[in-house]
Amino acid sequence: MAGSTRTRTKRLGRPPATDSAETRERIIDTARAAFASGGYDTSTNRELAAGVGITAGALYHYFGSKLDLYLAVHDDVQERVYGQFNAVAEAADGFLAKFDAVLDMAHELNEQDPTLAAFLGVVRSDMRRHPDIAAELSQHAQRRERFFVRLVDAGIDAGEIQPDHRPYMIEFVTTILIGLTDGVSDDSERHQRAISSIKMVLRGQMLTPTDA
């Protein structure tokens, strides 16, 4: 009888490592949605834990503080977004093709999960309000900027961008990709129109110059 009970418990149970990983993922997903909605200050650990269906004490088992959780969410979002950006950029040749691929992937990711772009938009305001967040995330900002630089340098290598235009194009790429998350990521149709307009501008299809 006792052996029968042990066998049944083992069969119905879930390996602790698997359960731990799944719970951690649910915490990050729940926290990302909460932070994306209102920023770092709007949710307490107790509220975040309740959203996952665990106690605040259990939450601390995974993340020692709300800042630790916020940084884990940021790491996860960066990996999801820039992992995809890097993959599609590496598969294309030249600046225009790479930038097109990144813009298309930005829209695809936004369609799949709008909280990704919303969270990235909130991060910038949270960094201004919280020096501890800004200090922790400064290295991520540098890695993001290096990605933008690689896009522009690919255009220089392909002869699409003049070398003396390099600093201006880096600022252009930075402004465009950040603006997509800050400005229109909450509206899919506007997001797609914005992407289409960027592509048209880069190809000289939006403006008709006139003599002064």
Image: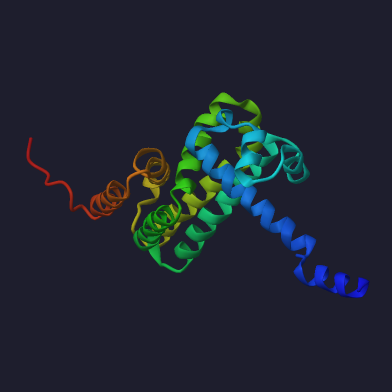
* In-image side of 123 versus 19 (left or right): left
Q: Give residue 127's position: percent from left, percent from top.
A: 56, 31
Image quadrant containing the C terminus: top left
Q: Residue furthest front?
A: 1
- Is residue 142 among what the camera can see? no
- Is residue 68 among what the camera can see? yes
Name the residue: 75% across, 40% down. 60
**Against 98, is 193 above or below?**
above
* In-image side of 22 versus 205 (left or right): right
* In-image side of 12 versus 44 (left or right): right
Q: Give residue 129's position: percent from left, percent from top.
A: 56, 24
How many marks can you see?
Answer: 0
**Against 3, is 198 above or below?**
above
* In-image side of 81 versus 196 (left or right): right
Q: Looking at this view, is 98 or 2 the one in front?
A: 2
Quarter of the figure with residue 199: bottom left
Q: Give residue 131's position: percent from left, percent from top.
A: 63, 26
Q: How is the image coloured?
A: rainbow
Image quadrant containing the N terminus: bottom right
Q: Give residue 205's position: percent from left, percent from top.
A: 18, 53
Q: Residue furthest right?
A: 2
Q: Looking at this view, is 66 or 100 the one in front?
A: 66
**Against 131, is 49 above or below?**
below
Name the residue: 39% across, 55% down. 111
